[in-house]
Structures are given as structure tokens and as C-alpha cells.
Image (cartoon, rainbow, N blue to C red):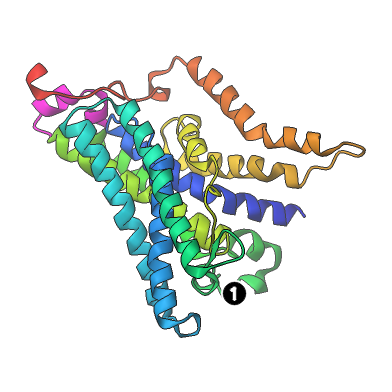
Amino acid sequence: MLVQFIQRAMMQGIPLLLGSTGEIITEKAGHLNLGIPGIMYVGSISGVIGSFIYETSVGPQNLNPVLAVLIPLLSSIFGSLVMGLIYCVLTVTLRANQNVTGLALTTFGVGFGNFFGGSLIKLVDSEMPSITLSATSNIFRTTLPFADKLGVIGDLFFSYSFLVYVAIIIALVASWILSRTRIGLHLRAVGENPATADAAGINVNRYKYTATCLGSVIAGLGGLYYVMDYANGIWSNDAFGDRGWLAVAIVIFALWRPHISIIGSFLFGGLFILYNYVSVPGAGIEVQELFKMVPYVVTLIVLIFTSMRDKRENQPPQSLGLSYFREER
């Protein structure tokens, strides 16, 4: 049961990891993108649409494994990228309020996903209000062939799909780039003081556009992973839940460091499914509902402790949430 819990916690944490990594990159450029939940939703439904079109056109038995992965992957990237560009145009170019823009994107993204998800459900004429892409999901969920031969070690570390390892690699690479490269230094400078970065010859708008769009694409992959791997290829409207908001909270938990978000995501993933593994003798279903509150209670505690930290390196970028206008320098 412990091995199963750890496996499910890691799988539950991957959407959170991709979402938080994408948001960290965005916030390092000085933009608070509260549209991450909506972007993850759009990334998810975009991948579902691409997979649905391909699977229905050639048939579940005739899928090309490469195309079955590539088509939903590129569809998800495209949908997330468009959402990131919309956010950039509004907040970077037009200097709209970042909080309002992000919340509007979240509302739009959820509505976009539910509209097209509902339309696809009507096309398949399913008795259940869902779409099942089992053939594509089975390809996405392919594990390493030698995992079964390694016992518990194989179950804990090598029994996952490729997107799990991609998510961890992205977080580690992002952490290295932000802390050890000139590009990361320039990006952090843009987030801390864009006027100073501009005076030093750094193209502020280019870094803001690149970081925000890249962060949106990474977050969108979290939505794709949830449907194709964790949910076994089943799309249901509003099934994604509050994972996008938890991903935003993990950014604060991780102190804006992508490598720490790996631990935070798996921790919150475990808290998210804890109620399935905790049994209180003689207690009713109300106690189980209380355990469902645990990740949100922990989020509040994290926010409280974060507000008490005084060290500058543990604080968000100084210009986070503030629009930059070059002529105001």
C-alpha cells in the first residue's frame, strides 16, 4: 500500500510540477500569471482534440505510436502558446492589470475546455458525460521495459510514463538555467528591476514574452499529462479540479526555485489523495471530507510562513505584478 501511495502521489504531483515550473519561469520575468489554471485546462483540451481527431480518423487499432504522441503533444503546446501570447499582448504590450488578465484567462480557459469537451462528448454519443481515448492513453502510459524486473526500486522510480521524467528534467534544467547561466541572470534582472535591465541593454519585452510563453507551454503539458496518463485518457468537464491553483501555491512553497517544486509537487500530490488511504474506525464520510481539505489547509499554512520570511532570496521578484513602461524610467 505504501508503494502504491507513493506512485499515485508522484503521478498526482506531475501536473502540479509542470504548472508550478511554468509559473516560476513566468514570475521570474516579473509577471504574476493567475491564468495558469485556465492555460492548463486549454492545454489539456487541445491535446484531447488533436488525439480525438487522429484516433477517430485512423481507428484505435491503427494508431502510429509516434503520431499518437506527437499530435496531442503539439496540439497542447499550440493551445497553451496561444494563451500565453494573449496574456503577453495584454500585460506586456498593452500593460493591462496582470491579476485581472490572469483571472480572465482562467475563466476563459475553463469555458473553452468545457465547450469543446461537451461538443466532443455529443459527437461520440456516449452514455457517460466523458470522452475515452484509451488507445492513445495506453501509448502515453508506456513504461520502461525493465521496471518489472527491479522489484520495489522499479515500482518506485521506473514505472512511470515518459512525461513524468520530462517534467522532472524540465524543472531541473529550468533551475540550472535560472541560477547558473547568463540567460537566467538577465531574466532575473528583468523580474527584479526592468528599468535597470533595460539600461544595461537587455531587451525587457523579449524576455517577458519568451518567459511567459515558455511557462505557459510547460504548464499546458501538465493538463495534457493529467488526461492522457493520470486519468487514463478520459476527459470529463471540470474533472481537472483545483490543481491549477495548487500549482500556483507551490511556487511560493518552492521559494521560486524549480528544483524545490519537485519536492513540493510530490508532497501536495500525496496530500491530495491522502483521504483514500486514511481510515478512521467508526467515522463516517464526513471525516473523509475533512481529509480532502488537507492540501488547502497546508497551502494556507505555507502562505502564513512565507509572509514571515525576511531573507531577500526567499522573496518574490521585486517587480512581480508591475507593468513596465520604458518612457517612465
Residue 77: quadrant of the picture = bottom left
Name the residue nearer the viewer: 112 or 329.
112
Whether residue 284 is visible to the viewer of this picture, yes or no, is yes
Q: Is residue 296 above or below residue 37?
A: above
Circle 1 Cα neighbour tier, 10 Å, few/some/many (<14 / 14–19 / ≥20): few
Total numbered labels placed on residues in the image: 1
The quadrant of the picture occupied by the C terminus is top left
In terms of secondary structure, where does tag 1 sit?
A: loop
Depicted 165 relative to depicted 266: above or below: below
Dividing the image into 4 quarters, which one contains the N terminus? bottom right
Farthest right residue in view: 282
Q: Is residue 185 left or right of residue 38?
A: left
Residue, x 45% and y 14% (percent of image)? 310
Q: Is residue 30 above or below residue 56?
A: above
Q: Position of residue 240 (x, y in %)?
A: 53, 48
Residue found at the far bottom of this picture: 62
Q: Is residue 197 magenta?
A: yes
The residue at which mark 1 appears reads as: 146
Q: Identify the amino acid type marked 1.
A: Phe
Instruction: Write down the region rendered in magenta.
Output: 188-202
On the image, the x and y values in percent for residue 178 come to 31, 39
Residue at image point 39% right, 79% down: 57
Q: Position of residue 17 (x, y in %)?
A: 48, 46
User: Which residue occupies 55% across, 71% down?
Assistant: 134
Residue 62 percent location from the top left of the image: 45, 85
The front one of 250 and 286 is 286
Residue 329, can we see it? no
Q: What secondary structure is the magenta-colored segment mainly? A: helix
